[in-house]
Each structure stands twice: as C-alpha cells, then as structure tokens.
Amino acid sequence: MDALPADALPLDGLPTDDQEFRLHVREWLEANFPHELRFPTRRLDFRQSLDWHRKLAAKGWVAPGWPREYGGMGLGGYRQVIFAEELDRVGVMVIPNFGLTMLGPLLLRFGTEAQKAHYLPRILSGEDLWCQGYSEPGAGSDLASLRTSAELDGDHWVVNGQKIWTTMAQQANHIFLLVRTDRTAKKQQGISFLLVPMDSPGITVRPIDNIGGYSEFAEVFFDDVRVPGDAMVGEVNQGWTMAKALLGAERILLGSPRLAKFPLQRLEALARSFGLLDEPVFRARFTALAMEVEDMVALYVRLLEVLRRGAVLGEEVSVLKLAVTELFQRVTDLLLEAAGEYGATDAVLPLADSSNLKPVHPYYLSRPATIYGGSSEVQRNILAKALLKLPG
C-alpha cells in the first residue's frame, strides 16, 4: 500500500478525513477558545492574545503550516484553510504573529541550525514576539531604497536609521530588520538581514494612532544599536534574497482569503439580523462577493502548496495580494452600507447570533490593505513586467 501523505498522518489524534478534521477542530475550539475573546470589536494585540497563543502552543496547533519536525502541524493548503475557517467561526480576531507567519518560515529556509534551535521554539511558545523592520519614511513600496545602515565594528554590527509602520513594535521584544551594509553597491545588492532584541540600547519606539483611535503601528529609531555578528541571517549583502522570499510570504499572508472571508461572515450575520437576505438585490450582491471569496480560496490553496513543496513563489503571488485586498474593501463597503445609519458611527451592534459587531472597524482595516505589503499599483506593475512582459 502507498504511504499516506504527510498531511494525512495523525498529529495529536487529528483525523485523516477532511470533514472529520474540521469537526475535530471545531469541537476543540468551542470548548477552549475563551468566550470573552470571541468577536471583539477590534483586533486583539499580542499581549491580549498571548494566553490564547500559549493554549494553542500546548496543543501543538500554533503553526499550521510549519513542518512537524519543527513543531508545526504540517497541514496542506486545504487544511490550513479549514483551520482558519474554524478560527473565524468562533470569532478569533488577532493581529498576525510575524514570528509564526514570516520569520519562522524564513529561518527554516535560510537560518543556521543554531538560529533555528534558538529562535523557533521561542516563537512557538510565545516567549519571543517579533515585529517587522522593513518600511522607512523614504522606502515603502520601493523597499530597496532603504537607508537604515549597519556597519561592522569588531564582532558587532552598529545600526542607525529609522523604520515606520512597524506593527506592534511597542509590544514585540524582537525585530527582524533589513539594513544597508554596503552603500556603494547597487541598491538591491547591499542589503543584509538582522535579528535584533527590542531592548537593545539605542532603540526608541513611538506609537502611531490610527483613524480608529488605537495604536497598532509605530516608528522605530536606531541610534548606534549594537547587534552581535551571529544575529545576521544569511550572508552579508545577500539580504535581498531573503527580503524577496519574505515579501512572498507576506503577500501570501496579506492575500489570505480569510482577509475577505471573515468580514463576509460578519456581513452575513448582520444581514440575517436586519432581514436583508430576504431582499433579492442585496442577496445577489452578497452571493457575488461570496463566489469571489471562494475563487480566492482556490488560488490561495494552490500557492500554499507551492510553498509546502519547498518551491519559491514567483511574481504570480501579486495576483493574490491584489485581488484579495481589493475584495476585502468591496466586502466592507457592503457591510457599511448594510449597517445603515450605524455605519456612520462607532456603534457596536448586538447581532442575532449573540455576537457584537462594530461595522466601521473592518471598514477601517480594509482601507490600508491595498497599500501595505506593496500597493495595488506596485502589484500591477510587477504583474505587467514579470508576467505580461510589458516594458517598464
């Protein structure tokens, strides 16, 4: 008999049938996800969700896409979607953990054995919470123009510069950082990748309030910050290779159909509470969005399987990020419209399914989605040049 695929092998009693797997996950989440954290009126930050992270870690379910030999669940693309859908069903709304979704996969591919042994268990346990030091005031979508520098001084790198729009820098205890280590090389060829503790002397964090009245972003300043030489991932001046790989992982994260599917679920709950699903025009608009979301699920699973095989995603990942973030906005547009007069306020609505909804919150989240991680204009340029072979 042929060996079962890795995704079908038991993990902590996980069923091998997809529907049984869904029910198993659903039952465990119903029994273990705290009721006070369900369907919050805004995303939970690192500290608010840390106890939940640790509960998932104890179960072995904190990293669905990581290989099992490194503490992950080893799930295939379709099962990762199932797992995410069940999290959405109970109202898990948490700011992405960049250690799990971005740095961990990068270390698995490029890190030394010592770096993997040190950092990966601490990411899984929640001991280390990571933020991403990429964007700068003059280097957002054109990331290769970054100017934050690192100069070698003995066995340490000395970092100077500024990062901006750094999600949860005020709570993270580590940052993975792109720095310029050769000012004379072409801009993509003089960049390196560093792992830096946030309590290092010389780091200053200034939170940025958003339109919703809370701080998820921050500016981070580096003034003669000393970083040990072994904190570099990969070779000196070879960081752009990792930057591109991580940008691909970021665009998978930002292109997750969950980005549009969760607000679509909340739109359905609102519509049922307001009796809107009985109106033919609204139902047609809702159904069209739901069909688009399922198209995105199919594309997402396909690209996840490319990563799972150890292959590198090409520029086609930009299709996913572009399509899902714009779909996210269309879903929240209809959500705000369906909320009527409540969509123009900070009102929190009790829904028929016993959950609460603040309609403006997902709308606020959707607005910058087409900007961060590479704006829609940048994604279209990438696709035009790389896939359609149009001139620059």
Image (spheres, rainbow, N blue to C red):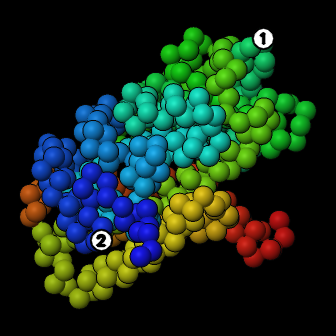
Eye-nearest disc, 1 or 2? 2
Q: Which residue is mark 2?
A: 18
The amino acid type found where label 1 is placed reads Gly
- Label 1, label 2: how far apart the Cα atoms are: 54 Å
Q: How many other residues sit within 10 Å of disc 2, few (<14), some (14-19) or many (≥20)?
A: some
The amino acid type found where label 2 is placed reads Asp
Locate residue 17: give its quadrant. bottom left
Q: Nearer the viewer, residue 157 or 263?
A: 157
Q: Earlier in the sequence, mark 1 or mark 2?
A: 2
Question: In percent of the image, x 68 and y 29: which residue is there?
Answer: 232
* Residue 162 is at least partly visible in this image: no
Q: Secondary structure at mark 1?
A: loop
- Residue 95: x %, y % from top left: 38, 44
Specify whether 5 is left or right of 181: left
Q: Is residue 264 above or below residue 141?
A: below
Q: Is residue 284 above or below residue 123?
A: below
- Residue 115: x %, y % from top left: 58, 30
Residue projecting furthest to the bottom: 280
Q: How many other residues sit within 10 Å of disc 1, few (<14), some (14-19) or many (≥20)?
A: few
Locate residue 186: give its quadrant. top right
Question: In percent of the image, x 36 and y 33: which residue is there?
Answer: 125
Q: Is residue 167 above or below residue 109?
A: above
- Residue 44: x %, y % from top left: 30, 41
Locate residue 273: give its quadrant. bottom left
Residue projecting furthest to the front: 1
Answer yes or no: do the residues labelled 1 and 2 have beta carbons within 8 Å?
A: no
Q: Which residue is mark 1?
A: 154
Specify whether 358 is left or right of 392: left
